[in-house]
């Protein structure tokens, strides 16, 4: 079942499952109260997803996470 999910993600984003696990591990172990850590994480995910994030959007995401915490639905950040 999970193989199919990762295959679909790979087809749509060209991101392999090992990269997804690496990102998940970095989030799990990250101090999300540290702004430098948040910004690095945002940039890393942006690179992997091949979706540029403007300075303004990065600032907005950092501000929202610092204020409200990490949302359960990432689309709530935008």
Image (tube, helix red, strand yellow):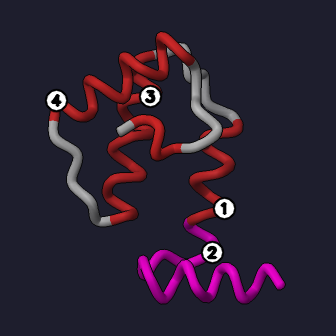
The answer for how far apart the CA atoms under marks 1 and 4 are is: 28 Å
Callout 1–callout 4 Cβ contact below 8 Å: no
Q: Where on the picture, by quarter, is residue 59?
A: top left
Mark 4 secondary-structure assignment: helix
Mark linked to residue 38: 3
Which is the main secondary structure of the residues drawn in magenta?
helix
For marks 4 and 3 on the same chain, the one whose residue lies earlier in the sequence: 3
Picture disc at residue 17: 2
User: Considering only order in the chain, which callout, 2 or 4, is on the residue closer to the N terminus?
Assistant: 2
| Numbered range of the magenta stretch | 1-19
Q: Earlier in the sequence, mark 3 or mark 1?
A: 1
The residue at which mark 1 appears reads as 21
Name the image quarter holding the C terminus. Answer: top left
Alpha carbon separation for disc pair 2 and 1: 6 Å
Q: Is residue 58 left or right of residue 2?
A: left
* Depicted 25 relative to depicted 56: above or below: below
- At label 2, counting other C-alpha atoms closer than 10 Å, the crowd grade (few under 14, some 14-19, many 20 or more) is some
Which mark is nearer the camera, 4 or 2? Answer: 4
Element on which disc 1 rests: helix
Quadrant assignment, res 70: top right
Circle 3 SS class: helix
Gap in angstroms between the C-alphas marked 3 and 1: 18 Å
Label 4 packing within 10 angstroms: few (<14), some (14-19), many (20+): few
What's the distance in space between the residues labelled 4 and 3, CA to CA? 14 Å
> Is 52 displayed left or right of 67 in the figure?
left
Residue 46, x across and y down, in percent:
33, 53
Residue position marked by numbered label 4 in the rendering: 56
Which of the two discs, 1 and 4, labels the residue nearer the N terminus?
1
Q: Dot 3: within a 10 Å radius of its alpha carbon, few (fewer than 14), some, or many (20 or more) residues?
A: many
Marks 4 and 2, how far apart in space?
30 Å
Which quarter of the image is occupied by the N terminus?
bottom right
């Amino acid at each position: 079942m999970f193989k199919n999910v990762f295959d679909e993600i790979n087809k749509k984003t060209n991101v392999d499952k090992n990269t997804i696990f690496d990102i998940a591990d970095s989030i799990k172990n990250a101090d999300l109260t540290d702004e430098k850590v948040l910004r690095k994480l945002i940039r890393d995910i942006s690179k992997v997803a091949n979706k540029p994030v403007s300075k303004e959007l990065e600032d907005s995401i950092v501000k929202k996470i610092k204020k409200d915490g990490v949302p359960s639905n990432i689309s709530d950040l935008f």
